[in-house]
Image (cartoon, rainbow, N blue to C red):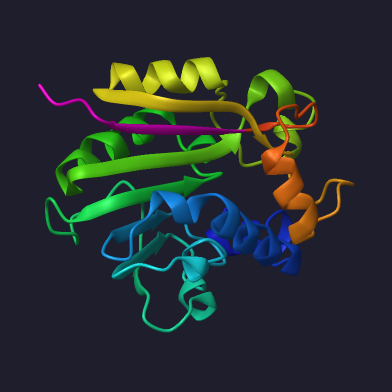
Amino acid sequence: MTPEGYHESRFVDDPRRDVLWQSLWRYRFSAMVTPDDCVLDLGAGYGSFINTVVARRRIAVDAWEGFPAHLAPGIEHHVGSVTDLGFLDDDTVDFTFASNLFEHLTKEDFATVLATLRAKLSPRGTLTIVQPNFRYAFREYFDDFDHKAIYSHVSLADFLEANSYEVFLTEPRFMPFSVKSRLPVKPIFIRAWLASPVKPAGKQMLVRARPRRF
């Protein structure tokens, strides 16, 4: 299967995705990124996250040849596998983001990404992951035919630790499973969701980590 085939079937363009990520940036992720940061978006897709980012330097990577057309002006891009980050200089990336990516990779490829990324992260560099939490999304998890690996918030954190990363934040029920859910995708509801201490419909997790310094 080609990346184009996936984007023509399961992962079609959806304007609700832009609303979601604009709101998440405004109400959550903007507090994690400074204007002087270099931000790297792995598996950028339609660019919904990286297009919202305000930072000194923005870089997007995806294997889909059509993704650069969806990026805002000023965003650097690289068409290729996320396992190959050789085009980046070492010690340059401050904030790496990956949404709904690593469940599409084998564990071997995920480990390769983590090993390669270590050298690219600056001394204050971090990795932020958002993806389905199998513990809460097991019914829908394989509705996406391209899912290759299974993670819960526990196993993902353990995998990161086993690959020399220190996990410093875990939110098991960060967001609903998909914009295709019956929940409204509007900024006011997203803000309320993020502020709520109870998220029974939360099926996507958020995990943040940094390379372990020996």
Q: Residue at x 19, y 59 (%)?
A: 88
Please state the horizontal and vertical placement of residue 175, each as a whole percent of the image. 68, 39
Q: Residue at x 30, y 23 (%)?
A: 166
Q: Is residue 39 visible?
A: yes
**Quarter of the figure with residue 118:** top left
Question: What residue span does the magenta drawing correspond to?
Answer: 205-214
Please state the horizontal and vertical placement of residue 56, each as a whole percent of the image. 29, 70
Which residue sits furthest bottom? 73
Q: Is residue 161 above or below residue 7?
A: above
Residue 21 is one of the magenta-drawn residues: no
Q: Quadrant of the C terminus?
A: top left
Q: Is residue 47 above or below residue 6?
A: below
108 relative to 204 in the view: left or right: left
Q: Is residue 3 above or below residue 74?
A: above
Q: Residue at x 30, y 16 (%)?
A: 162
Please state the horizontal and vertical placement of residue 16, each as a whole percent of the image. 75, 63
Q: Is residue 85 visible?
A: no
Please state the horizontal and vertical placement of residue 47, each as a whole percent of the image. 52, 67
In front of the other: 29 or 160 = 29
128 relative to 182 in the view: left or right: left
Q: Main secondary structure of the magenta part?
A: strand
